[in-house]
Structure formats: C-alpha cells, structure tokens
Image (spheres, helix red, strand yellow):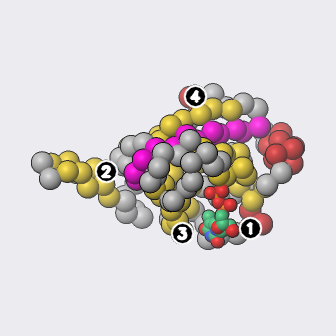
Amino acid sequence: MSPADIVLLPLRTFHDVRGDLTTLEPDDGVVPFAIRRVYYIHHVPTGVTRGGHAHRALRQLMICLSGRLDVHLDDGRGRVSVTLSDPRVGLLLAPMTWREMNDFAPDTVCLVLASEPYDEADYIHDYPEFVREASRIE
Ligand code: TYD
C-alpha cells in the first residue's frame, strides 16, 4: 500500500455559528456500501493497540468522532499510516486490509460503519496467513 491508497471520504457537514452537524444516510451516496452494522470504540486505555486483523469481505468506514488515533493499514505488500481526528471525514477500509489502531488520545470515540453483520469467520487474525491470502489476489 502507498499513501495514495488511503481513502478519506468527506462527510456531509452543516456548519453554522452553533457548531457542526454531520449526517450519514444509507442512500446519501457518500458511504459506498449498504450499512448493516454500527459499532464504536471508546474508553481505550493509554498505550493500547487494537485491531491486529483483516477481514476477507467486510467493508468499513471509520470515523473519529472525538479525540484522535493512528490507523496503520497493510495490504500484504506495504504499510501506510493515517491519523484520524476529524469527525467530518471517514476512512474507508477495504477488504483484505490488515489494520492496527494505536496512539488513542484519552476520551477518543471512534465510530465504525460496516457492510455486514458481525461474522467471526470473516476475520483473519494470523498475519502470515493474511499475507498468504493477500498474495493470491490479482
Ligand atoms: P475486536 O474485533 O477484537 O476489536 P478491535 O478490532 O477494535 O480490536 O472486537 C472486540 C470484541 O467485540 C470481540 O470479542 C468481538 C466483539 N465484537 C462483536 O461482538 N461485534 C462486533 O461488531 C465487533 C466489531 C466486535
């Protein structure tokens, strides 16, 4: 992966003197998949790394609602990192992307929209196995 492979989608935000309001709708043409699950990560202790897996089919959009975190993405050929801190932007996570998240600021809240219900069978937890499966693509 190279930095050009990082897809940051601007979300629809209404800004006025009262602050910002950001919207997401299933058919708004912004999220490039049907949203079938929503979860959020919060109360992450300092120094923790989360993730450490890939998904075979799942597509996700990660939005840092508050605070900041670093996301490290790896397609089996290269690794790139991005810092998320803007709730007006979503990071698209393609299938077969190994991801790790760390450097969470205190009180960070990270929202994730997912294209499928939770399915443990879609996970790859073993990095060598991920590299093997990724090498069969293309
Ligand atoms: P995990 O995938 O380890 O989180 P992260 O990718 O942030 O490291 O998930 C933590 C726990 O939550 C694990 O026991 C599985 C469970 N879980 C669900 O039950 N449903 C979900 O939608 C998700 C994402 C996780």
For the residues marked 4 and 3, what is the alpha-carbon distance in whole angstroms? 28 Å
Q: Amino acid at mark 2?
A: Arg
Q: Quadrant of residue 2?
A: top right
Which residue in the structure is indicated by mark 3?
Answer: 36
Q: Secondary structure at mark 4?
A: helix
Which range is magenta? Answer: 65-76
Q: Which residue is mark 2?
A: 12
Neighbor class of circle 3 (other Cα within 10 Å; few <14, some 14-19, many 20+) is few
Vertical placement of 85 versus 121: above or below?
Answer: above
Give the side of residue 38 with respect to residue 27, left or right: right
User: Could you tell me if the residues under marks 3 and 1 are in contact, i.e. CB atoms within 8 Å?
Assistant: no
Which label was assigned to residue 74? none
Residues at circles 2 and 1 in contact by the CB criterion of under 8 Å: no
- Marks 2 and 1 sit apart, C-alpha to C-alpha, by 32 Å
- Quarter of the image holding residue 136? top right
Check mark 1 vs ligand 1: CB closer than 8 Å? yes or no.
yes
**Sequence-first tag of 2 and 4:** 4
> Mark 4 or mark 1, which has the lower sequence index?
4
First along the sequence among labels 4 and 3: 4
Q: How far apart are the two marked residues, 3 and 1, measured between alpha carbons?
A: 15 Å
**C-alpha distance separating marks 2 and 3:** 20 Å
Tell which circle, 2 or 3, labels the residue nearer the N-terminal end.
2
Disc 1: which residue? 120
Q: Secondary structure at mark 1?
A: helix
The residue lying toward the viewer, choosing from 61 and 86, is: 86
Residue 15 placement (x, y as % from top left)? 20, 48
Which residue matches tag 4?
A: 3
Tag 3 secondary structure: loop
Mark nearer the N terminus (3 vs 1) = 3
Kindly state the secondary structure of the residue where label 2 is placed.
strand
Residue at 48% of width from left, 45% of height from top? Answer: 105
